[in-house]
Image (spheres, rainbow, N blue to C red):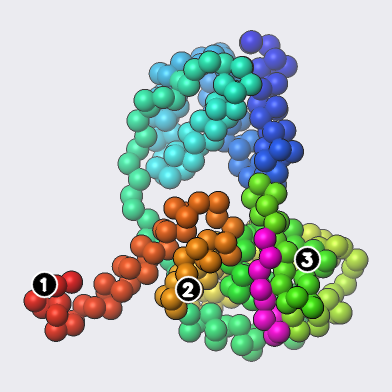
Amino acid sequence: MSSSSTAQSPLLAFLHFLEKEKRGSVHTLRCYRSDLNQFQRFLADQYEHDSLIGIEGEWVRAWIVNMMKEGRSPRTIHRKVSAFRTFNRFARRMSYTDRDPSNGVSLPKLEKRVREVVPERNMISLLDGSVFPSSWSGLRDRLMMTLLYETGVRQDELITLRHADVNVSRKNIKVSGKGGKDRYIPISDDTIDQAEVYMRSRPGDSERLLVTDGGRELYPAFVYRRVNHYITEASSLSKCSAHVIRHSFATHLLNRGADINAVKELLGHSSLNATQHYTHVTTSRMKDAHKGSPLDTRGIF
């Protein structure tokens, strides 16, 4: 199990499984590959062991301690260990190993993260369109921001949208979500008009709906830069990603009384547990809104 080719085979099989069977996004595959390769390099440097198979629990603990010494955040450490645990489940299912060396390993405590939300009025004001350039790239940026907020799609889902996914007659878009599951999300007449105007002026012949200034497929850093530029201009947030807009989309829907099961379907969540996170956000804000109420002084809230 120590030869390089043998050692690599379970990892390569796992990445192939993620890509072909789980239909993981390019971003997901890149993250798993990076995290697992980093652990594998640590094992080679510290224990002269070049495989993710046949390792000891104390080695996993040493890896965690090493990451803490390097100043990695608790959230990053949790993500990396989770990547290994996902790999290990696959390895056990494929009989590469019969044990989990991460079982019982303690992880650094996660601080409760307050998820930022762009205020609804700021999003509506931004999407009115006056801040976007009149060029075709401005049309693209406005359409990109509109789709993110109107549909709540993930960044990877936005990047892989095609012309053919916009159904003008049915007024929806087809979104290819995690695990290869498609969902159809309604879009407004205004968004359809935006898409049609943009597509008529867009250069190149890519099948992708949204492209870079050079006519190529979007990539995560490009989306982040455009989103961050517009949101930091339109709100008090110091930085903003597509994921923040997704959170804002869900939170605003729930604030308006939308059914949580409908929001779950729109977001493409496989479990209601993931969607229920947004109820904590809205409940917290409801409590804040009640502060100062005459009833609050009586200790009811």
Q: Is residue 192 visible?
A: yes
Between 195 and 76, the one nearer to me in the picture: 195
Q: CA distance from mark 3 to mark 1?
A: 52 Å
Residue at left 61%, top 42%? Answer: 31
**Residue 48 percent coordinates (x, y):** 56, 13
Q: Mark 2 — residue?
A: 258
Q: Is residue 84 visible?
A: no
The percent position of residue 21, horizontal first and vertical second, equals 71, 38
Residue 186 colored in magenta in the image: yes
Q: Is residue 180 one of those drawn in magenta?
A: no
Q: What residue does disc 1 label?
A: 299
The quadrant of the picture occupied by the N terminus is top right
Q: Amino acid at mark 2?
A: Ala
Q: SS class of the residue under badge 2? A: loop
298 over 162 or under it: above or below:
below
**CB contact under 8 Å: marks 3 and 1:** no
Give 238 or 151, whichever is nearer the viewer. Answer: 151
Residue 88 sits above or below residue 213 on the image: above
Lower sequence index among marks 2 and 3: 3
Contact (CB < 8 A) between labels 2 and 3? no
Question: Residue at image x 24%, y 78%?
Answer: 290
Q: Is residue 208 above or below residue 45?
A: below
Q: Earlier in the sequence, mark 1 or mark 2?
A: 2
Magenta span: 183-191
Which residue is located at x 62 percent, y 63 percent?
Answer: 153
Place of residue 110 in the rendered image (x, y in percent of width and height, measured from the top left) = 35, 45
- Say which quadrant the C terminus sits in: bottom left
Nearest to N terminus: mark 3 or mark 1: 3
Amino acid, disc 3? Asp
